[in-house]
Image (cartoon, grey):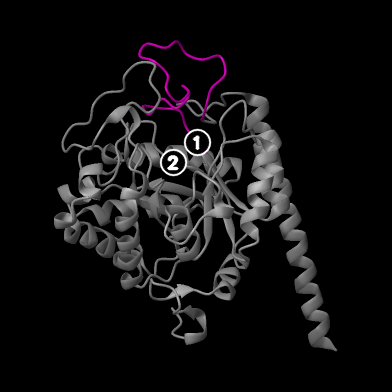
């Protein structure tokens, strides 16, 4: 990691936020990021994903193999404080195994440390996780570290240890794309109560000194009007790379992308895709044409049951139109034509990137000869 002072913006409250030049240089070194949010089909939530007795590398390897076949090059995955609290000595071993599998399939990884989402009012628990409730979207999902700990400053030294120890273990690891520090802070009724922990999380992450950029994505409200003392304003002024969520139609997505690009930093959409409003056939071209990375939700249908829409009732029948998810549990497409479109779209982008790279190489060779 460079120590060049020109790369740092010390006017910000969090030490060593990357200046835009450094962030944009980092982004230019990557191909167009086209990825997905990943929960293995065998995990009801991130605690089950990372716990010692339910971590499932065989399934992960199989499912990420399907992602490779489709051409994806990145994924976003939630970690969980409770998985660290239960087994801090060994969790990093499982994370490293996950990174091995992902990189072996050509996938860079964006880990997410905290999360305020509490589907169906659940809070985290140690031990066996609840089985999925039939018909209910993400019935087993729990926040990290849990809403009580978000506002319990007495417990924050443990949260700080979780953040710093996790980042320090992988701060120079090229398999890590960037760190998403906090998913949807303020969700599930938390509002601005999450801002103090969000601020501290950025400070802890900076102290861990990662070579990768750090971010937290705006997910609601008018980002143009966000003040520095609001959740959105803080995320936009402290993130090295601008990230956001958008599940809306084509035109609102394009408008938000162009608004966020005025900040002069790389822009990545870390959550999108819900049928029928937000589709691959209409949205991938926006991300490609605008040079914005994209991570849809989610790769494989499974215990999280995100084929059901938000707020689906207990016992809801299988919807004719899935809400999220690209593939079934056996790897077959939910809709064959849709999956073929995604594969072909990505392949076209990669061919164009290769052609452009060949032109640059030829130009450099010609320049050196003259």
Q: Is residue 30 above or below residue 191?
A: below
Kindly tell me whether residue 232 is visible in this rendering: yes
Q: Is residue 140 left or right of residue 107?
A: left
Foreground residue, 153 or 284? 153
Relative image position of residue 199 (x, y in whole percent): 34, 61
Please count the marks in the image: 2
Q: Is residue 76 left or right of residue 289?
A: left
Which residue does the numbered mark 1 point to in the structure image? 299
Relative image position of residue 307 (x, y in whole percent): 48, 24
Question: Looking at the figure, which quarter contains the C terminus?
Answer: bottom right
Q: Is residue 50 left or right of residue 281?
A: left
Which residue does the numbered mark 2 point to in the structure image? 38
Circle 1 crowding by C-alpha within 10 Å: few under 14, some 14–19, many from 20: many
Residue range highlighted in magenta: 297-324
Q: Residue furthest bottom?
A: 370
308 in the magenta segment: yes
Relative image position of residue 314 (x, y in whole percent): 35, 14
Q: Quadrant of residue 3?
A: bottom left
For the residues bearing labels 1 and 2, Cβ distance under 8 angstroms: yes
Q: Is residue 142 left or right of residue 40?
A: left
Circle 2 crowding by C-alpha within 10 Å: few under 14, some 14–19, many from 20: many
């Amino acid at each position: 990691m460079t120590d060049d002072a020109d790369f740092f913006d010390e006017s910000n409250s969090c030490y060593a936020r990357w200046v835009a030049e450094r962030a944009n240089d980092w982004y230019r070194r990557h191909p167009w990021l086209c990825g997905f949010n990943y929960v293995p089909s065998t995990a009801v939530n991130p605690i089950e994903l990372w716990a010692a007795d339910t971590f499932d590398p065989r399934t992960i390897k199989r499912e990420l193999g399907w992602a490779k076949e489709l051409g994806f090059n990145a994924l976003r995955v939630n970690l969980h404080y409770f998985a660290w609290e239960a087994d801090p000595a060994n969790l990093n071993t499982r994370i490293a195994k996950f990174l091995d599998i992902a990189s072996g399939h050509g996938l860079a990884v964006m880990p997410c440390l905290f999360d305020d989402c509490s589907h169906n009012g659940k809070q985290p628990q140690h031990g066996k996780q609840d089985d999925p409730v039939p018909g209910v979207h993400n019935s087993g999902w729990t926040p990290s570290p849990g809403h009580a700990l978000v506002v319990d400053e007495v417990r924050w030294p443990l949260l700080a240890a979780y953040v710093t120890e996790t980042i320090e273990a992988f701060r120079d690891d090229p398999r890590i794309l960037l760190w998403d520090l906090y998913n949807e802070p303020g969700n599930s009724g938390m509002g601005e109560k999450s801002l103090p922990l969000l601020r501290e999380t950025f400070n802890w992450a900076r102290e861990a000194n990662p070579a990768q950029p750090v971010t937290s994505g705006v997910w609601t409200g008018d980002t143009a009007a966000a003040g520095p003392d609001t959740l959105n304003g803080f995320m936009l002024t402290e993130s090295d790379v601008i990230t956001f969520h958008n599940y809306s139609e084509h035109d609102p997505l394009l408008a938000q992308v162009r608004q966020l690009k005025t900040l002069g930093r790389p822009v990545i959409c870390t959550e999108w895709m819900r049928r029928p409003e937000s589709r691959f056939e209409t949205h991938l071209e926006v991300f490609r044409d605008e040079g914005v990375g994209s991570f849809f939700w989610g790769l494989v249908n499974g215990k999280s049951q995100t084929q059901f829409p938000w707020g689906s009732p207990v016992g809801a029948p299988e919807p004719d139109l899935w809400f999220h998810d690209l593939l079934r549990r056996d790897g077959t497409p939910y809709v064959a034509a849709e999956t073929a479109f995604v594969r072909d779209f990505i392949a076209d982008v990669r061919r164009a990137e290769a052609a452009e790279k060949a032109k640059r190489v030829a130009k450099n060779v010609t320049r050196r000869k003259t």
